[in-house]
Image: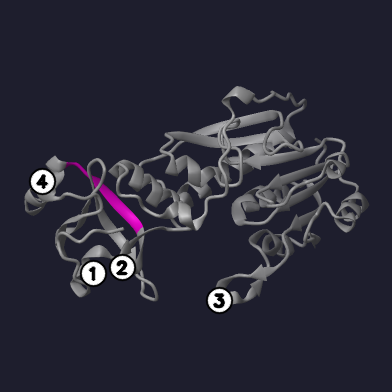
Amino acid sequence: MDKKNTRIIFMGTPDFGEKALRDMVAEGYHIVGVFTQKDKPRDRMKVEPCPIKKVATALGLATFAFDKVKSAEGVQAIKDLRPDLIVTAAFGQLISQEILDIPKYGVFNIHASLLPKFRGGCPIQWAIVLGEQETGVTIMRTVLRLDAGDMIVSQSTSIQPSDTYASLYNRLSEIGATLLLQVLQMPQLSFVPQDEKAASYQPILQKKDARIDFSKTARQIDCLVRGTNPMPIAFCFLGDQVLKVYEVQVLQRETLPSSGVGEATKASKVGQVIVSHPKEGLIVKCGQDFVKLLQVQLPSKKRMQMSDFLAGNKIPVGTVLG
């Protein structure tokens, strides 16, 4: 695409699309407007612009925000900018057919999964939570059906055992920016339909989805903890208190400390604490294997390493976490 003569609108809200926007500007692409969600209360309820709006403002780009971009006002604002292409990256609003029909090249979306798997708004978190070994980014042409448009290009990346939502999010953001530039530089585009039989959809991951179920395997619990870090954060109940869990370690019986082997044999319930010591940590029985809680937080308290937590909070062996 002609950098100077192709008029591009960028739509995004969180920082997932930040590098893509910066790279397009750095490469000389003609960004005629940036559409974001409206400013909302964020940290400590202070009203702040979203990350993409901050970046766009810093780059000197015109910004626009509507409660619904498909409203008459939103559509007219887009028409007035006369875009040849619209690029979206985690915009967070539905786009109408009227908008899809405006740019001659259509609307391209940076989607953080290997489509057709993991359509929907939280593909990164679910890929980790569900134990996938691989994910990636797909640049696709947007249609009215959610994430169902033809694919242009994709790139995969392995999900590492240490990956959290935060680390994978950052890596996929980098991949998405690189892929978008590749697409913009292609002399001719080809579009590949998605295999509907292989399609999967995951809903928005909510706080209730982050509750730890100790009847699951230790590996499944580790995936949940990593896939919800830094949000919405996995949690369980210690008595009547919510205990947020930021990091765990999977242990098999043969890797338990000697003090825990006998307790593991006696433990009759999943979620039961079999080791509780500042030096050996807090180890909990799961449906299969065990998890050692490494980093936790109680309400109104700071995030702590479990060794420090147990130095000031006694959790007797035999306690059941719910």
Q: Is residue 249 magenta?
A: yes
In the picture, measured across the screen, residue 218 lies left or right of residue 273, that is right
Q: How far apart are marks 3 and 1 (CA)?
A: 27 Å
- Quadrant (top left/top right/bottom left/bottom right) for the C terminus: bottom left
- Front residue of 263 and 144: 263
Of mark 3 and mark 4, the one earlier in the sequence is 3
Q: How crowded is mark 1: few (under 14 residues within 10 Å), some or many (20 or more)?
A: some
- Residue numbers of the magenta segment: 246-252
Q: Mark 2 points at which residue?
A: 304
Q: Position of residue 98 (x, y in %)?
A: 87, 43
The amino acid on which the numbered mark 1 sits, given as a three-letter code, is Asp
Q: Mark 1 points at which residue?
A: 308
Q: Mark 3 points at which residue?
A: 44
Q: Mark 4 points at which residue?
A: 265
Q: Distance between the residues labelled 3 and 4?
A: 47 Å
Q: Do the residues labelled 1 and 2 touch (CB within 8 Å)?
A: yes
Of mark 2 and mark 3, the one earlier in the sequence is 3
Dot 2: element: strand
Q: Residues within 10 Å of mark 4 (few under 14, many from 20)?
A: few
